[in-house]
Amino acid sequence: MERRKFLGLGAGILAATMVPMSISAQNYRETKIDLWKVKNEKGKPGVDAAIKALFGTDKTEEGKAKLKAPDIAENGAVIPITAKAEGASRIAVFQDANPESAVAVFDVPKNGIADYSIRIKMQQTGNVVVVAEVDGKLYKASKTVKVTIGGCGG
Amino acid sequence: MRIKAKSKGGVTTAKVMAKHPMMSYAEAEKKGKKANFITYVIAKVGDETVYEASTSQFLSKNPYLKFAFKGDHKGKEITITWSDLSGKSKTDSKKIK
């Protein structure tokens, strides 16, 4: 292939898989209002749709994202999870156990360390999913959490 | 807000427990109340933003947040602000140990 054409092709492929640049310091409740509305329907989890609503693509790889969550949650109202990814500029948490999918989005500031712990609620057994953006690519980790007593007032 | 922050080995770790009912839409419907939950949290040391999270109805009541950032900030104040769906916000500070 001609060199110029080849370089152009490479740039095109790169552009297609890169995540659109994010502006840091934003309140996603204001800037990505649709993200929080993506539903988990019965038999049709909303996780991929929520990932796409936030990042602009749902194409993810394994590897850099790490998720720590219990195998079994005795109390579905308080489930400790930790989401981390070295070098991430953004980390998001989703699940398919509640009516809507998105749980939290962390923009990692300049000297921030992408290692975040929170406690979440799950109405029922389901998957918790972490997606981290590192150098314009998305990495995913997920874990099934068994919930013995549902924690969403349900 | 309960805040604990300390610097060690060039890293500052913070643990925050905010006081908030974090009432989800499902819970609110059941109780005949209005849903309300923290939607945004930001932490700063001086002018520097060290943590930023957009949160949802699916964080547990009285949300617990743990995060870390680079730097030795012993003696400085960390300021945490949260705002919720109803538009209310709260700010608290604590000295980093």
Image: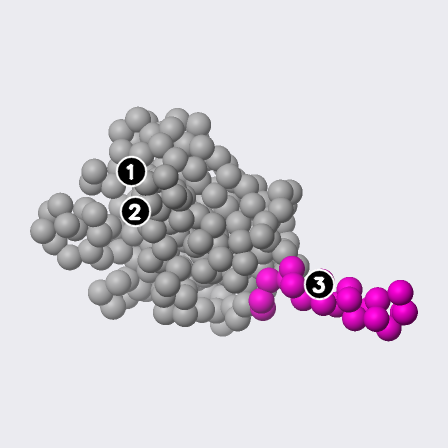
Image quadrant in which you'd find residue A22: bottom right
Magenta span of residues: A1-21
Residue type pointed to by label 3? Leu
Front-lying residue, A8 or A38 = A8
Chain containing mark 3: A
Disc number for residue A143? none
Front-lying residue, B71 or A139 = A139
Chain containing mark 2: A
Disc number for residue A14? 3
Residue B2 counted in the magenta span: no
Residue at x 65%, y 60% (from the top left corner): A17
* Pointers 1 and 2 within a single chain: yes
Identify the residue position indicated by label 1 in the image: A123
Q: Residue furthest left?
A: B32
Q: CA distance from mark 3 to mark 2?
A: 35 Å
Residue type pointed to by label 1? Gln
Can you give x and y, in whole percent of width and height, for residue B89 in the image? 28, 66
Q: Are marks 1 and 2 in contact (CB under 8 Å)?
A: yes
The secondary structure that dominates the magenta segment is helix
